[in-house]
Amino acid sequence: MNKLLLTFLVPLFSLGQSDLNSMYIGDLLPDAPKLAARGNFKVGVKTIQVVNPNQIDILSSNEEKTILYDRPLTLEIWYPSILGVDQKEEVIYNQVMGNFSDPKRPLIPFKFKGRASRDVTPNQSNGPYPLIIVSHGYTGSRLMFTYLTENLASKGYVVVSIDHTDSTFQDAKDFSSTLLNRSIDDLYVLNKLSELNNDSSSFLKGLVNTDKTALIGYSMGGYGAVNIAGGGYSEQAVKFFKALSKGSNALEKRKMGNPDYINSFDNRFKAVVAMAPWGMRNKVWDKEGLKGVKIPTLFIAGSKDDISGYEKGVKAIYEGALNSERYMLTYINARHNIAPNPPTKEVMVPGLHIDEYLRYADSVWDQRRINNINQHFITAFLGMKLKNIKDYSPYLDAKKFEEQDPWYGFLPRTSVGLEFRMATPAQ
């Protein structure tokens, strides 16, 4: 029997219905592809508060005056850890769903379990570890992607997920703050983690290799991720922002061709994963802006995305980023929600607003299957770009996929409903 197939079948046959009923978010379904499995490290998790000083308070500024403030951010950090004999790899996350400004969608607090242990000792012996920064959508939360953040930490990464101020379920404010601050927050967090890595009083001391950093962004997080990758915003984006923000030109500094933007590009970012990135249909980028994307990028999208768009949205960004090594995974007939955790039983109550359900679910795809496929492809992509694991290249070989059934790393009959593309930089 094929060795790869046998590796899959052992856990498949040993998984009973009781195991399925007790699955944690991010656990493997029987049809999960090869690299979705967790790695060998135990996972710790810790919450910290940081402050980015002297930032533009876009909600108080206007065309005539610019007001500065100290911008607070909450970070959730997952990391390889060491557990004592009495410590269990389990954590309870506190989350909310809802829309604080819509009485028909009140905030609903809920809890869910994860496979990590809070505030435990880091595993220093195998570090330092590459850094992965995760950026949520509008509105969203740093805890929306624990299936992925825990999984990557178990494979030897430090993973930092940001609560973007003015953009979460609990504090969402005018859209202009999200437009301005996404990529700025990402750059600040990279610098902050580098600082903490050199701070003898920090649990992160010596744990992080910020010279090998990736950014994963979903929706508005993807909007910021493309900007981080070199996709400077267009003149149309600056005008759009100005109309929303009482005449402010603050987004100008993230525009293509602006010297401040060019000088801000950080070579420590080695790869970007842009999941359903928002903005192309709103002309946030033009052809010249997308030509600025020069680092390896993995795009993930649903072909029926009705928020970011597909043909004129995510796919157009992929096609326009001519100067980058790039890949694109498409879930056929899926909509926008191809990145978050699945809905949990704690919130699946009668009368739940459909938009709250669809924030965590897709009407065609099993969200847990999407989670497993994301784990697989992101593991392969970041393993190659941050850890130089050349053995992962067959998992991303779109040309061979055209002749393979199933795709490399998939069980028989399971690489269906998907499209995968790849392109090399223009010569």
Image (tube, grey):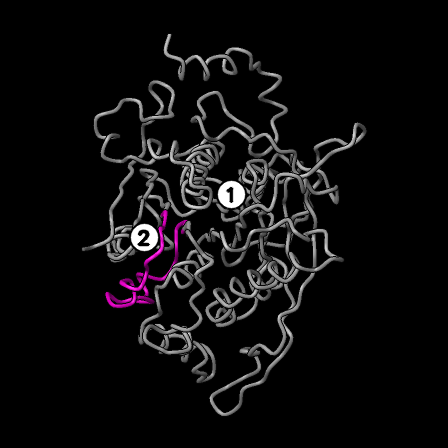
- Secondary structure under tag 1 reads loop
Whole-percent x, y for residue 11 in the image = 52, 16
Looking at marks 2 and 1 on the same chain, the residue that comes earlier in the sequence is marked by 2
* Number of on-image labels: 2
Residue pictured at 47% horizontal, 51% vertical: 216
| Tag 2 residue | 314
Of the 4 image quadrants, the one containing the C terminus is bottom left
Q: Is residue 62 left or right of residue 256?
A: right
Taking the view exactly as shown, the residue that stands out farthest to the front is: 125
Residue pictured at 46% horizontal, 37% vertical: 379
Give the quarter of the image for residue 347. Answer: top right
Going by the numbered disc 1, the residue's amino acid type is Tyr
Compared to residue 322, the image places residue 360 above or below, namely: above
Whole-percent x, y for residue 105 in the image = 58, 54
Residue pictured at 55% horizontal, 33% vertical: 26
Give the quarter of the image for residue 316. Answer: bottom left
